[in-house]
Amino acid sequence: MAERVAQIQAELRQIRGDELEKLDEFLVRYREDERPGVRKLVGQAEGRREKLLRERERLEKMRVYERSCADRGYRLICGIDEAGRGPLAGPVVAGAVILPDDCEIFGLNDSKKLSEARRSELFDEIQDRALAVGVGIVGQARIDEINILQADYEAMCEAIGALRIMPQILLNDAVTIPQVRIPQIPIIHGDAKSLSIAAASIIAKVTRDRLMLEYDALFPEYGFALHKGYGTAAHYEALLKYGPCPIHRKSFLKTLESHRK
């Protein structure tokens, strides 16, 4: 009997978290089984099923803007977001993502709400399942030259240009990009409200974080691997000790002296 229960446990383990039909089939087979070990497994399957249904409901709510665009005849809907507007060092990075209709990527959310490990997993899944992914990167020298807002726009334009498919409409996180003729919908906190923008936020964030890890290897004294260039106390302490390095944004360091004790 114990061997049979172990086989049923292995069967449940083989069902992926997004396979609702297989969970339902498992429950049909074993729901009436009275063995305590099987009853426990049935409870686990029911819990997984409920969690999956809640996640599908959450994802459906994040399709509101995409559904509205589709109802108006748009099919190639592109989410746009950026990462790195606020740091003292490193580039600003924009992501552009076109997802297929009714694409389900479980766990997809605003990148700020996810762990680094989960963002990395979702990054790979987005790359695999998206119709098109584009990235734009604008470095610190250009940021100092034209200011961060204009650099944001430039990175977003570059990300759109890197798409292998031209989108029909853009869903942007909060901004309207100048000089882009594609129809645009700016959405405040869009990375938490739109699946397409959430996907773009993950592409931008993971790309930038990986760049900052590379910079950490070049300039280890600043701790870029930990703070990714943001203005933490440790980062300011390193700046005061070593001075700026080549990837620091000089226009962001005007108040550096105020951090001296």
Image: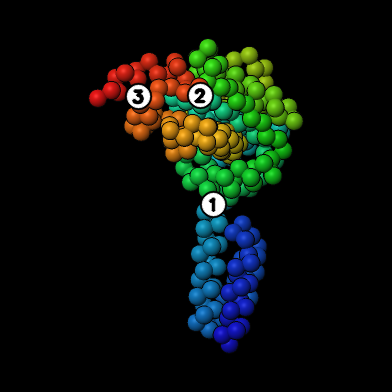
Q: Is residue 151 above or below residue 100?
A: above
Label 3 vs label 2: CA separation? 15 Å
Mark 2: secondary structure:
loop
Q: Which mark is residue 232?
A: none
Q: Which mark is residue 55?
A: 1
Question: Circles 3 and 2: CB distance less than 8 Å?
Answer: no
Q: Name the residue under label 3.
A: 240
Q: Which of marks 2 and 1 is nearer the N terminus?
A: 1
Classed neighbour count for the residue bearing mark 2: other residues with Cα under 10 Å, few (<14), some (14–19), many (≥20): some
Mark 1: secondary structure:
helix
Question: Circles 3 and 1: CB distance less than 8 Å?
Answer: no
Q: In which quarter of the image is the N terminus?
A: bottom right
Q: Nearer the viewer, residue 205 or 198?
A: 205
Frontmost of labels 3 and 1 is 3
Q: In this view, does 25 lie above or below 84?
A: below
Amino acid type indicated by mark 3:
Leu
Q: Whole-percent x and y of residue 176?
A: 56, 20
Q: Quadrant of the C terminus?
A: top left
Q: Is residue 210 visible?
A: yes
Q: Earlier in the sequence, mark 3 or mark 1?
A: 1
Mark 3: secondary structure:
helix
Q: Residue 247 carries which label?
A: 2
Amino acid type indicated by mark 1:
Glu
Residue at 60%, 70% in the rendered image: 12
Classed neighbour count for the residue bearing mark 3: other residues with Cα under 10 Å, few (<14), some (14–19), many (≥20): some
Q: Whole-percent x and y of residue 14?
A: 63, 67
Label 3 vs label 1: CA separation? 46 Å
Q: Is residue 192 visible?
A: no
Label 2 vs label 1: CA separation? 40 Å
Residue at 61%, 47% in the rendered image: 105
119 left or right, relative to 103:
left
